[in-house]
Amino acid sequence: MRKLLVILLLGICTIVQAQTTPDKKTSLFITQLIYLVPGQEKVFDQFEAVAIPIIAKYNGRLLVRTRLEQKNIIEQTIETPYEIHLVEFETEQDFNNFMKDEERKKFLHLKEQSIKSVVLVKGNRL
């Protein structure tokens, strides 16, 4: 699992360096490996349609949202996630406020119905 996470994070770090400004040294980066309940892809998309636009309300940006293709995986010791997200928030408090957003909370039942598990990694720019 460590090798896959390192490979994913190294690839994403290149994207982060290219797309973020140097003055955001205190930014918090959230990487999520998202695993779905089989057959719940449409329900998951309904939740994402609500949750993703709310990110901006809390000084956040969705930097990457991707789905891996098996042919692009070099080495693997864990199940392939359905999606991988990389999100940047200006501060950890902004992320905490996003998680508590009342509009987002109204749709958490869709998340709970569709997501089997999530691996969430918090990080900062080095």
Image: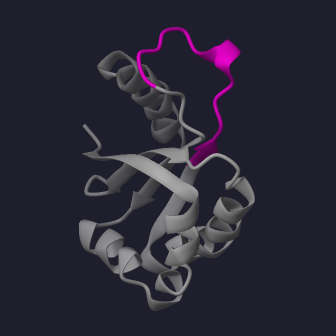
- Relative depth, front residue between 16 and 7: 7
Q: Which residues are magenta?
A: 64-78
Can residue 29 be seen from the camera position used here?
yes
In the picture as drawn, the residue positioned furthest to the bottom comes out as 102
Residue at the spot 27% in from the left edge and 45% down from the top edge = 123
- Is residue 76 located in the magenta-colored stretch of the structure? yes
In the picture as drawn, the residue positioned furthest to the top comes out as 74
Can residue 21 be seen from the camera position used here?
no
Q: What is the tally of numbered marks visible in this picture?
A: 0
x, y percentage for residue 69?
A: 69, 24
Residue 51, image quadrant: bottom right
Instruction: Provide the major secondary structure of the magenta segment.
Output: loop
- Is residue 10 located in the magenta-colored stretch of the structure? no
- Relative depth, front residue between 10 and 101: 101
Please say if 113 is above or below 75.
Answer: below
Which quarter of the image is occupied by the C terminus?
top left
Residue 1, image quadrant: top left
Query: Relative to 113, is 44 on the left or the right?
Result: right
Query: Relative to 3, is 33 on the left or the right?
Result: right
x, y percentage for residue 35?
A: 52, 44
Indicate the colouring scheme. Answer: one colour
Residue at the spot 34% in from the left edge and 69% down from the top edge = 95
Residue at the spot 63% in from the left edge and 40% down from the top edge = 66
Please say if 99 is above or below 38.
Answer: below
Query: Relative to 29, is 123 on the left or the right?
Result: left
- Relative depth, front residue between 114 and 120: 114
Residue at the spot 40% in from the left edge and 76% down from the top edge = 98
In the picture as drawn, the residue positioned furthest to the right comes out as 42
x, y percentage for residue 2?
A: 30, 21
- Relative depth, front residue between 100 and 26: 100
